[in-house]
Amino acid sequence: MIKVEDLSKTFGKTEVLSDISTQVNSGEVVSIVGPSGSGKSTFLRCLNLLETPSNGSVWIQDYEITNPKTNILKAREHIGMVFQHFHLFPHLTVIDNITYAPKQVKGETADQAETKAKSLLEKVGLTDKANAYPNNLSGGQKQRVAIARALAMEPEIMLFDEPTSALDPEMVNEVLDVMKDLAKSGMTMAVVTHEMGFAKEVADRVFFLDHGKLVEDSPPSTFFSKPETQRAQDFLEKIL
Ligand code: ADP
Ligand code: MG
């Protein structure tokens, strides 16, 4: 579903991603962990070309998104992304946030888009908030709307960049629960997170990034009990 070959990214003279190669299969959930500044966000953003890799290739299904000839807007329709700070449209109601792209980009009719949006709102437990504005929602509710909005484009892959890091602690689980359901439904997911419980319970693989290198790629049972590298051991000692 995702293939990355020799991916590097430099900002000026600083190399923030260094020669990363990996693959993610359909239906797999990968948790990406590592110290702050290790390149997790940059890696995720390279997967949908929000950052342009300096070197290497990225395939999303059959789209080689690093090939300049690829229609990147078309390719991006297959990839949903959820950010730490929600990025909802503040001037649109919840339902309009969700129907906007399906209508504008996919050409769905208002009826089609609304029917789907309502079923997504039910999925994320926010049926009663369809006509609310983002400013009147809690952080956890906003993030669940952001997830519903991404799903409305019917992506095959979902990328999450610290989706619970901006939330008050009591709201973290309502968002993680939605993500767990999504994982169970077979969605291919790459999740940058500090929620080690989620990584342990839900992820098929854990990627550990350090100084821009993918230094470990293991099942959570291995990563959390006997990480291969000293750097991962040091990281885990600090956070667990
Ligand atoms: P993480 O998400 O793991 O905290 P990032 O991917 O955000 O790490 O950042 C990796 C490194 O790249 C950091 O040193 C950061 O300062 C640098 N960086 C990220 N984005 C930019 C940018 N647009 N310009 C210059 N440096 C950047
Ligand atoms: Mg980050």
Image (cartoon, rainbow, N blue to C red):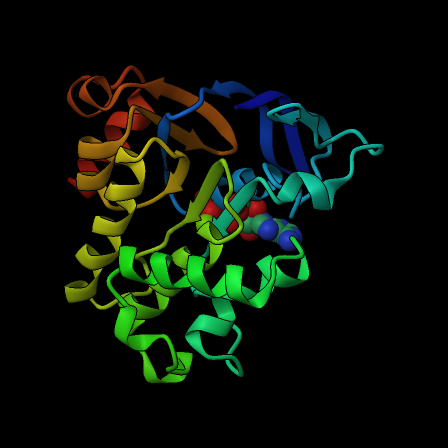
Identify the residue at image location x=70%, y=42%: 74
220 vs 45: above or below: above
Q: Is residue 38 visible?
A: no
The x and y percentages for residue 117 are 43, 61
Which picture quadrant has residue 175? bottom left
The residue shown at (17%, 40%) is: 197
* Residue 82, placed above or below residue 62: below
Q: Point out residue 170 in the picture as x, y percentages from the top left corner.
A: 14, 65
189, 216: nearer the viewer: 189
Q: Quadrant of the C terminus?
A: top left
Residue at the extreme right:
69
Q: Nearer the viewer, residue 142 or 209?
A: 142
Left or right of 47 on screen, residue 168: left
Could you tell me residue 219's position as x and y percent? 27, 19
* For residue 51, side relative to residue 239 (left or right): right
Would residue 35 be found to the left or right of residue 67 on screen?
left
Task: Specify whether 69 is left or right of 139.
Answer: right
Asked if residue 51 shows in the view, the reply is yes
Q: Nearer the viewer, residue 175 or 145?
A: 145
Q: Is residue 132 above or below residue 171?
A: below
| Percent of width and height locating residue 37 | 47, 46
Q: Quadrant of residue 120?
A: bottom left
